[in-house]
Amino acid sequence: VNLPAQGQGSLDVVECASESTLFSELTLVFKVFLILSACALVFGAKRVPPSFVEHRFIIFSAYNTAIFSGVVLLLTSSSEDPSTAFMIHCAGTCFGTIIVNGSLTIPRFLLAFDIWRVDTIEKTSVGASAAVTGSNTTTTVAPETSSE
């Protein structure tokens, strides 16, 4: 494709248009279904034992994606100008991606370099027991006997 040089020639712009909004509505329904199904799947991950600390970060990432998607959808649908809606969509995608990637990678680096200890995470989780928190020792007390 030969593009015209700057200031010379013309560039034809073809714009697709349709009187029906069925395709965009179906696409929106599919995206909402995907996000809600991801939230439902990570909600089931709450029953994972606390020794698997990874599920908290995945839950945060999925809910964060759902919230960012909802906010971006509201802002882009309220915008009259297509270029503004495109910029809002791009900014929301960038911020959402940065936060999700940060929530998945930063805790791993902190755990890898022993800055953030797994024992402290497991002790604060609901229903954690001493057997799960890394305590491998048990103390038994013998009953007192009287020697007379």
Image: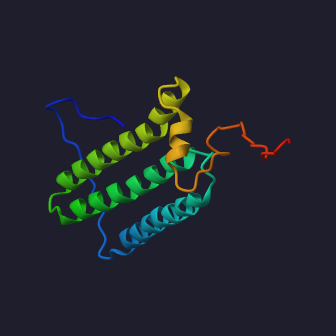
- In this view, the residue farthest toward the front is 148
Q: Quadrant of the C terminus?
A: top right
In this picture, residue 24 sits left or right of residue 38 = left
Q: Quadrant of the N terminus?
A: top left
Of 114 and 84, the residue lying toward us: 114
Residue at image point 45% right, 33% down: 106
Residue at image point 19% right, 41% down: 10
Residue at image point 33% right, 42% down: 94
Picture layout, residue 104 above or below residue 25? above
Of 61 and 125, the residue lying toward us: 125
Percent across and percent down for residue 63 are: 42, 57
Percent across and percent down for residue 53 are: 57, 44
Picture layout, residue 23 above or below residue 8? below
Q: Residue 91 is drawn in which quadrant?
A: top left
Number of callouts: 0
Of 121 and 36, the residue lying toward us: 121
Percent across and percent down for residue 145 are: 82, 45
In this picture, residue 124 sits left or right of residue 84 = right
In this picture, residue 19 sits left or right of residue 106 = left
Percent across and percent down for residue 24 are: 36, 68
- In this view, the residue farthest toward the right is 148
- In this view, the residue farthest toward the top is 113
